Each structure stands twice: as C-alpha cells, then as structure tokens.
Amino acid sequence: MPEKNAYSIILDGNGEAQCVIKTTEVNIMPFNEVTETFAKTEGEGDMTLEYWRKVHKAFFSSALEKTDKTFDENMLVVCETFEVVYY
C-alpha cells in the first residue's frame, strides 16, 4: 500500500531503475467515485474519466478472475498521486 511522502524506485520490464517518485497523496475510494481530475493526472490514453474507467475495469476484471471474484463498480481502489523526484 503506498504511503504519503514515501519514496519508490520505478523499474522497467527488465528490472532496471528508471526513476524515483515521491507519493504525494493516497486516496481509497469506490471505483465509481474516481474523479475526472485523477484520471487526467494519471495521463493514460485520452486522459478522460471514460477512458480511465474502461481500461481499469478491464484490468481489475481480469485480475479478479484469478481470485474467483468479480468486478463491482463500488469496490474500493487505491488512487496514488506522485511526483518524479529523480530521473
């Protein structure tokens, strides 16, 4: 679980360090309450909430299948905001 003000080393697919981040905010909220602002900050796809929900629903659904659970719009998700402090 990410912690506010904690530092993390981000690795690429080969396990090589790419940057260091500092977590600036951690929010736990229902999937269906994630905001447009958070989706845009995450910076994926076209940066809309619609896109964020589509790709994350697919990701969570796939991951949950392995645990015999199903996706639910009300399930809690961890939303982490961070800044890159070394690149």
Image (spheres, rainbow, N blue to C red):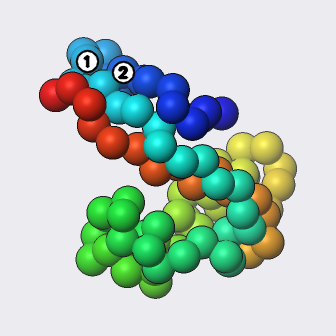
Res. 19 in view: yes
Say if 42 sits above or below 78 in the image.
below
Q: Is residue 62 visible?
A: no
Could you say which is closer to the camera, residue 5 or residue 8?
5
> Mark 2 is on which residue type?
Ile
List the residue tagged with mark 2: 9
- The image shows residue 30, relative to residue 65, as above or below, that is below
Q: Is residue 87 left or right of residue 76?
A: left
Residue at 67% in and 69% down: 31
Q: Quadrant of residue 20?
A: top left
Residue receiving disc 1: 17
Q: Is residue 76 left or right of residue 4?
A: right
Q: CA distance from mark 2 to mark 1?
A: 6 Å
Identify the element where label 1 is drawn. strand
Residue at 70% x, 55% y is 28
**What residue lies at 47% left-to-right and 38% top-to-bottom?**
23
Q: Position of residue 6 (x, y in %)?
A: 51, 26
Q: Nearer the viewer, residue 74 or 67?
A: 74
The quadrant of the picture occupied by the C terminus is: top left
Residue at the farthest left position: 87
